[in-house]
Amino acid sequence: MKIKFGDYFIRSFRLSDVKTIAKYGNNYNIYKYLRDYFPYPYSEKIAKEWLNFVLSQVPETNFAIANGEELIGSIGFTIQKDVNRYSAEIGYWLAEPYWGKGIAAEALTKLTEYAFSKF
């Protein structure tokens, strides 16, 4: 999957994303705003485990946020069950050097449109 917005993309994860996930994810300023299951410190071993999980997902609901060169974050949604089956929870993180540029807001808009059209 790949959705372009401006100079950025929401795309499927790749095994080659391991180093950049660990590089940008290993940041306390990101960790402190996320759910407890997001680890800190964030190692390459943890990044490999995450990639193994998301690359085997059916349906695919977790994606990379990237520029033309590398992954700069992650965005995804969890489809709810039972009486909440018509809703989903969206989560994301963005590498700190890219904060304040509207990237996350636009990625949220695009992923929401995608989720509603596919699910």
Image (cartoon, grey):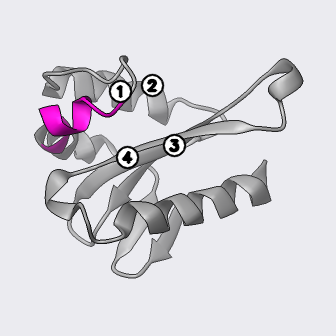
- For marks 2 and 4, the one nearer the N-term is 2
For marks 2 and 4, give the one nearer the viewer: 4
Q: Nearer the viewer, residue 59 or 99?
A: 99
Q: Position of residue 71 (x, y in %)?
A: 26, 55
Give the quadrant of residue 98.
bottom left
Q: In 3D space, how far apart are the residues under numbered discs 4 and 1 (Cα atoms)? A: 11 Å
- The answer to whether the residues at label 2 and label 1 have Cβ atoms under 8 Å apart is yes
> Disc 2 marks which residue?
53
Q: Position of residue 12 (x, y in %)?
A: 46, 51
> Disc 3 marks which residue?
76
Q: Where is residue 116 in the image (x, y as percent from the top left)?
A: 76, 55
How packed is label 3: few (under 14 Cα within 10 Å), some, or many (20 or more)? Answer: many
- Mark 2: amino acid: Phe
Q: Which quarter of the image is occupied by the N terminus?
A: bottom right
- For marks 4 and 1, the one nearer the N-term is 1
In this rendering, is residue 112 above or below 44? Answer: below
Q: Which mark is residue 74?
A: 4
- Mark 1: amino acid: Trp
Q: Is mark 1 on a helix, strand or loop?
A: helix
